Image (tube, helix red, strand yellow):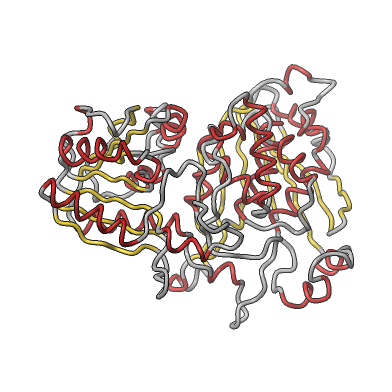
């Protein structure tokens, strides 16, 4: 793997002081899994570029695995990719740029504390979830993100894209902060690590995430992926992040049921039957399929002006903004902190860099109180919202959405409680998120939706989202109301 870091700061070659690597020298550093090379393709006063090239030796990597490692006897045979490339690059960064990541520079201490113009490029980065996932994780940190899919073969466009992207990050930031963000997010995007997860991984995450992870709108997803969905470690990490932010733990997205397809806990995944990486064959996550279902429903009903009621950090809004079908888009949420994340994701705080001027606004409001700003849209979306409302307040929400706002189309999604038995390790009667006030069975949701439709002059159709289990139904149920 290759990583380049460039700056156009005054006396750009001072980048060598920050990295503690001289621009006039090419250096090599032995790793347990290969060799890391550091060199400078460009180095003058106007622009300086440092490159970290990681040369992985797969045989050496296998030989370093201890016999206590799970599946040691089979691991080197059943995987077509016996290492997680991004995880190895992150480990090499921690070894080669250790002092830089700590923000220390005895010769230029003022420079180490300063934000400088940076451009970071990874020509081939494994990215589970595609370009949108890179945007989701890096953009809230202040980066301008370009993630371009790498085709499987440029000569055969019909083969489609690979699971890799060319990632370019540009912005002004302390070099130490940039390196620590890369250290955490590279293996998170790959969603795999090359080593067994131990409790000290929480310490590494908290240390590298200091000053940015606690306020990231997707901190819970990042923490889960970084810690390979080990629930005890994830809960400990989120608790410590809460302490660091001086906030209650529930404000930092407590551990919820991981709704994505099951995968190995540690790093590489065994081959599929046809010899391909199983990660390439895995279906889209439930979260992604839910967004796709909502967007499709809006297309089907020709609803082009949409308000997302309970928009959270703006995942659906960002998807709508990338779709030229939609003419006007707005979002509202009761959480000011979530709205800050949505504004960053949509570039509302940087008018010159906003990708689309059709996003009118995101604003704070509660769905249980009438608000004139809710009115005038063809469609309203409540995606995974109703289950967060106390049952005695549901009637007020119904009146606000269906009686006051009166959109022509309303799309409501909510968990199917019957499907919870399919989630490994979930206690009987437990709910998927600690903030859920209830979770409906299919019959309960149908009864509620049919009653609301009859009371307010709508018809409703019911759509399963996710794999429709013949016994317990799909994990998410969706109602599409049309007035």
Q: Quadrant of residue 238?
A: top right
Which residue sits furthest bottom? 274
- Taking 446 as reference, is 62 left or right? right
Q: Quadrant of residue 63?
A: bottom right
Which residue sits furthest top? 110
Name which residue lies at 38% across and 34% down: 354
Above/below status of 33 relative to 333: below
Residue placed most toward the observer, 380 or 342: 380
- Taking 480 as reference, is 77 left or right? right
Residue placed most toward the observer, 2 or 330: 330
> Where does residue 118 sit, x and y in percent of width and height?
62, 33
* Numbered circles on residues, count: 0
- Taking 166 as reference, is 243 left or right? right
* Location of the N terminus (image quadrant): bottom right
Above/below status of 9 relative to 237: above
Residue placed most toward the observer, 220 or 26: 220
Q: Quadrant of residue 21?
A: top right
> Where does residue 248 sit, x and y in percent of width and height?
58, 29
Name which residue lies at 54% across and 43% down: 137
> Where does residue 341 sit, x and y in percent of width and height?
46, 33
Name which residue lies at 25% across and 39% down: 395
Name which residue lies at 84% across and 68% down: 62
């Amino acid at each position: 793997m290759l990583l380049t870091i460039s700056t156009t700061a005054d006396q750009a070659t001072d980048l060598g002081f920050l990295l503690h690597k001289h621009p006039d020298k090419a250096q090599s550093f032995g790793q347990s899994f290969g060799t890391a090379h550091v060199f400078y393709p460009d180095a003058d006063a106007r622009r300086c570029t440092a490159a970290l090239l990681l040369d992985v030796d797969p045989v050496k990597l296998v030989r370093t695995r201890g016999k206590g490692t799970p599946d040691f006897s089979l691991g080197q045979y059943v995987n077509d990719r016996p290492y997680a490339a991004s995880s190895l690059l992150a480990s090499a960064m921690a070894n080669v740029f250790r002092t830089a990541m700590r923000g220390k520079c005895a010769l230029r201490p003022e420079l180490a504390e300063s934000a400088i113009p940076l451009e970071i490029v990874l020509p081939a980065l494994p990215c589970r979830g595609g370009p949108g996932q890179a945007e989701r994780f890096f953009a809230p940190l202040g980066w301008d993100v370009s993630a371009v899919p790498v085709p499987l073969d440029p000569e055969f466009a019909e083969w489609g894209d690979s699971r890799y992207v060319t990632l370019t990050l540009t912005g002004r930031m302390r070099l130490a902060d940039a390196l620590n963000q890369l250290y955490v997010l590279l293996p998170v995007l790959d969603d795999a690590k090359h080593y067994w997860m131990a409790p000290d991984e929480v310490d590494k995450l908290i240390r590298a995430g200091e000053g940015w992870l606690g306020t990231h709108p997707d901190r819970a997803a990042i923490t889960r992926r970084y810690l390979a969905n080990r629930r005890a470690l994830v809960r400990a990490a989120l608790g410590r992040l809460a302490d660091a932010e001086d906030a209650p733990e529930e404000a930092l997205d407590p551990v919820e049921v991981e709704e994505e397809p099951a995968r190995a806990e540690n790093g590489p995944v065994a081959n599929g039957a046809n010899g391909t990486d199983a990660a390439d064959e895995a279906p889209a996550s439930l979260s992604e399929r839910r967004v796709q279902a909502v967007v499709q429903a809006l297309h089907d009903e020709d609803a082009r002006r949409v308000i997302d009621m309970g928009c959270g950090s703006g995942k659906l809004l960002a998807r709508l903004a990338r779709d030229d079908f939609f003419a006007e888009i707005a979002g509202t949420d009761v959480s000011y902190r979530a709205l800050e994340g949505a504004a960053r994701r949509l570039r509302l705080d940087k008018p010159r860099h906003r990708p689309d001027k059709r996003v009118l606004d995101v604003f704070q409001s509660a769905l249980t109180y009438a608000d004139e700003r809710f009115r005038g849209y063809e469609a309203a979306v409540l995606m995974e919202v109703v289950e967060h409302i106390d049952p005695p307040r549901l009637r007020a929400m119904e009146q606000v959405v269906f009686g006051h706002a009166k959109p022509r189309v309303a799309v409501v999604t909510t968990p199917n409680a019957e499907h919870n038995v399919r989630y490994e390790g979930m206690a009987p009667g437990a709910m998927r998120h600690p903030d859920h006030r209830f979770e409906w069975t299919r019959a309960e949701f149908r009864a509620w939706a049919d009653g609301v439709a009859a009371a307010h002059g709508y018809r409703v159709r019911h759509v399963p989202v996710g794999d429709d289990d013949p016994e317990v139904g799909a994990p998410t149920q969706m109602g599409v109301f049309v007035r």
